Image: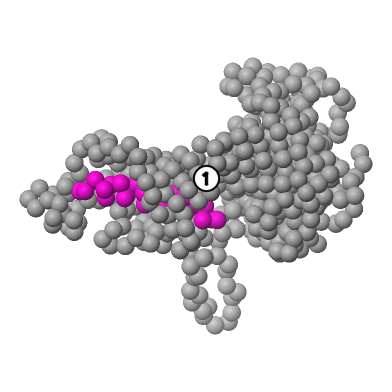
Amino acid sequence: MPISPLAKRDGGLFNAPVLNQQTLNRSVTYSGIGLHSGNRVTMTFLPAPPNTGIRFRRVDLEGKPEIEARVEHVSDTNRSTTIAKGNTKIHTVEHVLATFAGYGIDNAIVELDANEPPISDGSSREFCKLIQDAGIAPQDERREVYKVTELIELQAGETMMTVLPYDGFKITCTSSDKGGRFTQFYSVDVSLKTWEKEIAHARTFCFFEEIEFLFKNGLIKGGGLENAVVIRDDAVLTTEPMRYPEEFVRHKILDIIGDLSLVGRPLQGHVIAIKPSHAANCELAKLVTAQMRKPLVAAQTFGPPPVVKKSAEQEKADLFQIMDEVGALDSVQIMKILPHRYPFLMLDRVIKIDGNKITGLKNVTINEPYFQGHFPGHPIMPGVLQLEAMAQLAGILMLRNAENAGQLAYFMAAEDVKWRKPVLPGDVLVIEVELTKVRGKLGKAKGVCKVRDEVVSEAGITFMLIAS
């Protein structure tokens, strides 16, 4: 297979010689069918400024909402990787992401007029042609490569994945089905040259007995032998000869490259994978992200180590890690995210974070200052303060994303507000908020307050992020 002129330069995403960020030289467009949705879709790759990262833009939706290709936005990993923000979703992003990673594209916008990129022939071949046609443009900002510093391990059932420190980016993979059929092994140092020649053309595949299940679950509506290889018993069904002797495991490596790019930075490390899946790939990306956010360990000296005061930026990075790994925050941690203070902080704890949903609580005591006047002899928590608690919790969910760190969430509007029952001293107010829509700096959410599992108030709220 021919190697494009781009491959003659040393410098895929995972090669140290490329020191600065890169984008596309011009925009390029491709149309096709989505694998799982079956929708006709037109996709355009556009250049983007430094530090933009890879972003998907739904031009078919009002406001043209964007989703950053980051692991915290992964919402589903059933047979492909789906990212979501509010109600906006993009399915099967891994082949596009692998292409950008293989060519070392740090910053680009992917415009789509449907909810899934075209599947093409089931590989990244056509996407590679788009990059070759567009050309690569160097940028002034320096590229930040993350070097894995210590062993990372993941095991889930028969799946095992490990990342070791390594001077470069290497993937060693073994794949097979549950019965051990078509077991394949491949190992490769990923560079622009090996990506384009050894990995990019490997097609997606499935086993014949899986097809009925996938159809019944609303998947592979656009699937066929023109965009996938089907294995039936010991036969391989395909419209052309196999492109590689180990095409199946090479496609698994392609998926790993795409899914691990969701950490948002180039990696240096050796990934060893046994029976990988999109779910495991994305969980591994979360573990890498957690390691990446750990504070740097001070070098040891002969004397007592100095006390190093953490910067506000590092403290926020630690909080992001806690939110990702634990999904809970105490009142001190909440105050490091929100600017609110006594007597207007309406949250005591965040007890759960699950994707676009967050749950917090407020212990309502007789010592609340508003009970002096609301009302003497008949204390009731003001409904507007329950509304404020919803807004504060929604702000935490919005500020959870690293790119929003340091901003403030301004409460702008409330809709469909209902107060159903009074909240009294001694009650524990449980606040549940779901982020329903994000458009740029604007966010919308649905909030509910409960006492003893009974709804006491609810509302739709709108807020905006501004620089602090």
How many numbered circles are shown?
1
Specify start and end residues of the magenta stretch as a single range: 381-404
Please tell me whether residue 332 is drawn above or below residue 284 in the rendered image: below
Would you say residue 261 is visible in this rendering? Answer: no
Q: Residues within 10 Å of mark 1 (few under 14, many from 20)?
A: some
- Image coordinates for residue 74, horizontal then vertical, percent: 57, 41
Task: State whether residue 4 is above or below residue 306.
Answer: above
Kind of residue indicated by mark 1: Arg
Q: Quadrant of the N terminus?
A: top right
Q: Residue at x 78, y 21 (%)?
A: 225
Is residue 349 or residue 268 the one in the foreground? Answer: 349
Occupied quadrant, residue 122: top right
Res 451 seen here: yes
Task: Name the residue: 85% across, 57% down.
Answer: 10
Q: Nearer the viewer, residue 294 or 424?
A: 424
Q: Is residue 415 magenta?
A: no
Return the residue at label 1: 439
Magenta stretch: includes residue 395 = yes
- Residue shown at 55% from the left, 41% from the top: 63
Q: Nearer the viewer, residue 144 or 166?
A: 144
Residue at 19% over, 53% down? 365
Judging from the image, the colouring scheme is one colour
Drawn side of residue 299 relative to residue 235, left or right? left
Which of 149 and 240 lies nearest the eye of the viewer? 240
Q: Main secondary structure of the magenta part?
A: helix
Q: Is residue 57 left or right of residue 134?
A: left
Instruction: Tell me: residue 42, above or below residue 3.
Output: above
Q: Quadrant of residue 99?
A: top right
Q: Residue furthest bottom?
A: 303
SS under mark 1: strand
Q: Residue furthest left?
A: 377
Residue 276, position as x, y percentages in the image: 67, 38
